[in-house]
Amino acid sequence: MDMLAKPVFEGIWLPMVTPMRGGHVDLDAAQALARYYRNAGIAGLVLFGSTGEGNLLSLPEKIEMAEAIASDPNALPLVFGAGGVDTRGVATAIRRLDKLAPAGYLVPPPYYLGPSQAGILWHYRQIAWATERPIILYNIPKRTGVTMTVETMEKLALLPTFRAVKECNPAVLSALHRRGHLTALCGDDLSLLDHWIAGGRGAIPAAAHVFPERYVEIMRLAQDGHIEAARECFEPLRGLIRLLFAEPNPAPIKRALALQGLISDELRLPMMPASRELGSRLQRAMGAIQAPSSRLQTA
């Protein structure tokens, strides 16, 4: 699907894991996951971000996986993560990926370098020259080592290419939403309910890999004004969300999906699988969440 004509980043866009098997990308599992999340009501998929181990994948691997998912005539729209240290390298990769007609790109500032705000602006403006497709800014200081200011983000919002920002700081997310210059997408999973209640329209939550239908239901309840019902639905997820980030992402998410039989519990080195202890805790937490719904179905 060609999404060049003004896509709207609303709803839940899942930053999907990259399934691995035997050291290679498991294309069959990737296709099955994409169908599973489409049927759950997910709005779109973000491939090759940090949750997707994007920096550990070669460009040919990314193209092959994206083509496999997009081959489904009912495929969800795809956003591609495009992070890197070297601006020219990121721009070159985007030019190659552009041939796949993505809905846009999720682009963090250059990591490790710690550029100034002026350097960040330069980086993004160069990236904008590489594509006509929408760019979602990604403000995640924990991984990049640098924080984009609201002023920097709003300067970029003056250019038509920059449509939204995935923001992981709840206070900044709230400020961006109030100011209204740039679509603010929630990147802090524990803040999701507050984001929907405050009128937020979109999010990119990694935790929604597990029980995606529940996350979609929470969003719809909150947006329809059923705040207490949304809260009752969200509260049991808080403990599981914390567990899903208790060890380096995406190891806990992959373990949870493997426990559900959806993928193999494999990451690309140097990323390691989740510990056995965390796996046991995840299994207990997931079982506790499943139990009430299964009782309701049999009642």
Image (cartoon, helix red, strand yellow):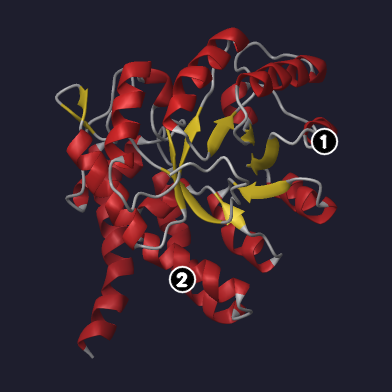
Q: Quadrant of the C terminus?
A: bottom left
Residue placed at 69% from the left, 34% from the top? 161
Residue placed at 20% from the left, 23% from the top? 24
Residue 28 falls left or right of residue 37: left
Q: Residue furthest left?
A: 22
Front residue of 99 and 137: 99
| Residue 217's disc number | 2
**Residue 36 % position (x, y):** 28, 55
* Residue 54, visible in the rendered structure: yes
Residue 104 falls left or right of residue 237: right
Q: Secondary structure at mark 1?
A: loop
**Residue 219 % position (x, y):** 54, 67
CA separation in Å, label 1 and label 2: 34 Å
Placement of 24 over or under 236, stated as above or below: above
Q: Residue furthest bottom?
A: 299
Placement of 293 over or under 60, stated as above or below: below
**Sequence-wise first label, 1 or 2:** 1
| Residue 238's disc number | none
Tag 1: amino acid: Leu
| Residue carrying label 1 | 158
Residue 12 falls left or right of residue 210: right
Residue placed at 54% from the left, 10% from the top? 89
Where residue 253 sits, quadrant-wise, is top left
Residue placed at 70% from the left, 65% from the top? 199
* Residue 242, visible in the rendered structure: no
**Residue 21 % position (x, y):** 17, 29
1 and 2 marks in contact (CB < 8 Å): no
Tag 2: amino acid: Glu
Front residue of 81 and 129: 129
Q: Secondary structure at mark 2?
A: helix
